[in-house]
Amino acid sequence: MSPSLALVAVVFVLVATGVYLVLERSLTRVLVGVILLSNGINVLFLLASGPAGAPPLVGSTPVSEMSDPLPQAMVLTAIVITLGLTAFLLAMAYRSWQLHGHDEVQDDVEDRQIRTRAGRDETSGSYDPDDEESPVEERSEDRRRAHASPAPADAPSGSRADRRERRGAARSAERRARGRGERP
Amino acid sequence: MTGPLVGSAAGLLARALAAGGAEGAQGRGLRATQGQVLEWPTLVPLPVLVPLVAAGLALALARHRRAQAAVSTVALSVVLVTAVAMLVAVQDVGTLVVTVGGWPADVGISLVADQLSTLMLSVSSAVTLGVLVYSVAQGAADGDDGAPVAIFHPTYLVLSAGVSNAFLSGDLFNLYVGFEMLLAASFVLLTLGGTSARIRAGSTYVVVSIASSLVFLAAIALVYAATGTANLAQLPERLDGLPDGVRLVLHLSLLVAFGIKAAVFPLSAWLPDSYPTAPAPVTAVFAGLLTKVGVYAIIRTQTLLFPEGRLDDVLLVVALATMVFGILGAVAQSDIKRLLSFTLVSHIGYMVFGIAVGSVVGLASAIFYVIHHITVQTTLFLVLGLVERRGGTTSMDHLGGVAKISPLLGVLFFVPAMNLAGIPPLSGFLGKVGLIQAGVADGGVLPLVLVAGSVLTSLLTLYAVAKAWNRAFWSRPATVDREEETRAQEDDVPDAATTLSGVGEVHQRRGAVERAQGGSVLAPAAGERRTAAGALTGLEVDPDRVPVDMTRVPRGMVAPTAALVALGLSLTVLAGPLLRIAEDSALELLQRRPYVQAVLGQQAADRVASTTQAGDVLDGPPGSGR
């Protein structure tokens, strides 16, 4: 069986444009991309079913001239499923637009956080697992100091040790304060 | 639940089933146990049919919450009973096959329940039922205001039907349909309520899932073009006759599709982003089941379709990367939900390791590990749901002393956490030992590297969960000073919004969010809770400090969690028989012939070569004899 080159070209164009659109940020474009992609794959199923033949109705045509009905059934199922998924994606894009005024896929919160921290040359939230007392407070203190006097870029180890020391001091001070505070 | 209500719901269900062409589940199961062996295969479609019919019923009963809950509980109990009955039956009579609609097996759709399928089905339905009971209790406790819970039960049942369909499917395209059922349901469950955080997480999840489905669909088209069938029993023979290059393309495209669903390393980035935002029961059931369906599909691909193991080395490298990168991600997290999402990714690596080694021991350990991991990971997420109710957050920075405030929660977290890390004699340890044995027995350089990697991952898992334990459970009760919080907020507004590192908690307990955004917005209700907290813990409550939120955890939510913890522990006790079943099914998988024989008959089976290792172990017509 040699597949029809025209169909192969159709599949290629549909899938290529579909992939391009799926890589966009806007959910609406992703939606269009998904539709193109799935149509491309449906055409791929038609390719898989071999050369076109007569309708596969028993009695109307000899079996040897029938086209293969199974891929057509699969394509139908796939179309229905894609329809459902597309509807959901569309609803989600609309909801996103309602909430945020745009329908773009947003970055992960954690990713954003790490990026901003990296930009400010800070350690991550779980850098020092010992400080279970109140890392939030200490971090904000660090930040305030960092803003006030930016550490020299050529001495990272020194600044880190420095920061640790300050952390330790802050921690013990806080422990003392808490000890006083909780005693009846 | 009221008795008559349950009765009438069950009656309705049975009638609906009879109308749909199947018969009432319980009657059938009972008669079958009385020795009518021919009746067994009629059980096979039930795990798919019953939840689907019940989903329709539950949707119709949307206004009657109790009836809805009763329908779902009964339906999933029926599925559990059916699954266990099939598991027992398969040991006796061999693989059960149903060709849907009575079409011949080579054109129709067949449902196949062999040892692997029924084992997975039993565990998954037990977990699904547990999570359902938990969520019913949660709904009852919350009074259901605001959340569109009417849709929860039908969707959850469709999810369960999809999982069952994927496990039982004997046809690649039917497997795709099963995947789509569970994915479509999971989209709805993940974005339940449509809050900002969930839409953000949902859009990533939905787009990635659709992409994986499209890859899978394209792979099916290619498989069909190359072989002219999508039937899993026909494929082995026809794939064996294909040129190497074509086989490689088909193999790779299937593995990529399943790899995205199973979240193996380069394809796993979507998971930790999306899972933690969902409600606790939803995250729990996703973590337990969805990735494991992908692992199941990988097992089938590697054993039934492409047994020669050409991509084993690739899989080994991928497994190592999944384990190590996953666990390094977990170590860096400060939110326990996210931490557990990363351990979920990481431990998928163990299963892929076992599959890639490909020996009977390796495969059996991988199957055992899947079962262990389904139970443990689900339990941990359920416990976190309880912790979140109690403490208002799952961020380690804000939790503290949970074990002191509620020792029960401490125990419920500690046991599965240690199980996850693989502390002897728990089931996680047994699974890991099996995998390491398989790797050492293989003796190659790469498997030995993986043995080292898995030990390292195990240690780092222990470190990660111990960190969570120390900071959230073992330390002093967290009392966040309101002034400090306000200062932190004034200091840096965008960061204060993220200090909870929090995706997860935004939706759940409003109290937590209020606290994160400065204590000044605390409602008077929080004051009452504070007094309650003082009364409970015996600590004096400083009005300036906001202690851990002391909402009582409903007993109905604790009970299923405890039951799942017990199930996890019972895996240790029952490890002997379970490992035997796992080994049997691994052998059956590697031989390939039993599957083909059960579906298409002896002649077709004789044309299929079994994998060398397994063929040497057993000869003669296997499958029906055991």
Image: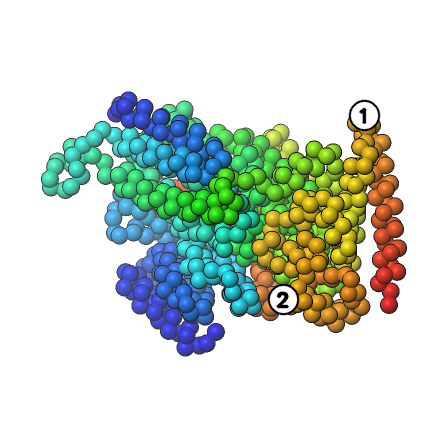
Callout 1 crowding tier (Cα within 10 Å): few <14, some 14–19, many ≥20:
few
Residue B79 lies, in percent from the top left, at: 42, 60
Say what amino acid the circle numbered 2 marks.
Val
Assess whether mark 2 and mark 1 are in contact (beta carbons under 8 angstroms): no
Using the image as rendered, state which of residue B102 and residue B187 is in the foreground. Answer: B187
Which residue occupies the extreme left position in the image?
A60
In the displayed structure, B152 sits above or below A9; it is: below
Q: Is residue A141 visible?
A: yes
For residue B149, side relative to residue B540 (left or right)? left
* Residue closest to the eye, B387 or B409: B387
Q: Which residue is mark 1?
A: A154
Name the residue at 41% across, 74% down.
Answer: B5
Q: Secondary structure at mark 1?
A: loop
- Chain for disc number 1: A
Left or right position of A81 against B366: left
- Identify the chain of the residue marked 2, using the numbered disc in the image: B
In the displayed structure image, the side of residue B412 where residue A172 appears, left or right: right
Label of residue B553 in the image: 2
Specify the label residue A86 is tagged with. Answer: none
Instruction: Tell me which amino acid carries mark 1.
Output: Asp
